[in-house]
Image (cartoon, grey):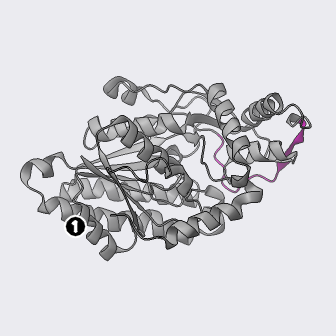
Amino acid sequence: MRILVTGGAGFLGSALVRHLLAETRHSVINVDAVTYAALPGALADVEHDSRYVFERADVRAAAAMDAIFARHDPDGVIHLAAESHVDRSIAGPAAFVSTNVGGTQVMLEAARRHRDRLPGPRADAFRWLQVSTDEIYGSAAPDQVFDESSGYAPNSPYAASKAAADQLVRAWRVTYGLPTVITHGANTYGPFQYPEKLVPVAIYRALAGRDIPLYGNGTQMRDWLHVADHAAALARVFEAGRVGARYNIGAGQVCTNRELVLRVAGTVDRLAPERRPSGHRIRFVADRAGHDQRYALDTRRIREELAWQPRVALEEGLEATVRWCMAHPELGPDGAGCVRSRASAVAAAPNRA
């Protein structure tokens, strides 16, 4: 199959592209606008693969999306392209609505028009996978676990924009017959994550001997899912998920943000013992507006229906991520300008087709 992956130069998207090319026979058309969070180095190992094509384009550009569908004739779409950082959504929600909602609508229309032109068997086999988030459920009560029948209650502009995109996807399935599936993923971490999320912030600050900020009192509960496990789950859902179904993706590795940072600090101290111990450098800061206290997912559907299981234990994944960050100091907060420079260089490069 030829799979059009949007947002494939980002953190989770690049892991998915690498997984599809290494573990399946599928070909990949990677459509990415190469914004500030894109890490083109994450695709260095696949950029010369004959089954891989990169198209630099914005999912909000309808004419460009129609041209890409016509040029590459994909058999399905995995839609990851999105603005994803909650803090940024609070500071500037318009970009999140524009990309996450408007871009999804543009992509859905391009996919619908493309599918309508396909011959019967290919039209029947066409799939759209919407990659969403567990944040659309809102904050769970202490004894509450969200399954796929739970209602939407987003609390941040980011979560609201993803919830709105999910509802568009549902509407395009019901109204136009576009075969769609939706996933809700837990907090994801691992190599190549842009250094504004909690895990890379904690790692790079611990390595630099700097304070590690935590919102509120650090008791927010999160399930931590390694990016390789998340990518494998997306591939599995795309290939075998039921049309119209939603699938929660989580590892069942739940801890508070404070506990997570202490684990990161302990791992850094063990791997880099010459540095000043970092666990005592946690600094609590004013809590984020509308901060969800707890996320909790029931993941029986993907485990039982699709036989998917997470493989990376949290301790193993954190150690591997710390080692990766130690080997890539240029990608830390102090080197973020280097990331933007590299992204700009890729943006200026011609498309591979």
Image location of residue 180, percent across then percent down: 28, 49
Q: Nearer the viewer, residue 352 or 242?
A: 352
Q: Nearer the viewer, residue 114 or 151?
A: 114
The residue shown at (50%, 47%) is: 12
Above or below residue 255? Residue 1 is below
Along the horizontal axis of the image, is 85 left or right of 311?
right
Q: Secondary structure at mark 1?
A: helix
Q: Nearer the viewer, residue 80 or 351?
A: 351
Residue 215 appears in the figure: no
| Furthest residue toward right | 276
Image location of residue 121, percent across then percent down: 9, 47
Q: Nearer the viewer, residue 249 or 218?
A: 249
| Furthest residue toward left | 120
Badge 1 is on which residue? 70
Report which quarter residue 264 is drawn in. Answer: top right
Dot 1: within a 10 Å radius of its alpha carbon, few (fewer than 14), some, or many (20 or more) residues? Answer: few
Along the horizontal axis of the image, is 158 left or right of 270?
left
Image location of residue 253, percent across then percent down: 59, 28
Residue 40 appears in the figure: yes
Residue type of the residue flagged with mark 1: Ala
Q: State how many labels appear.
A: 1
Magenta residue check for 157: no
State which quarter of the image contains the C terminus: bottom left
The residue shown at (70%, 43%) is: 327
Q: Which residues are magenta?
A: 280-293
The residue shown at (34%, 68%) is: 106
Above or below residue 184? Residue 308 is above
Image location of residue 99, percent across then percent down: 46, 67
Report which quarter residue 246 is drawn in. Answer: top left
Along the horizontal axis of the image, is 48 left or right of 333?
left
Along the horizontal axis of the image, is 313 left or right of 307?
right
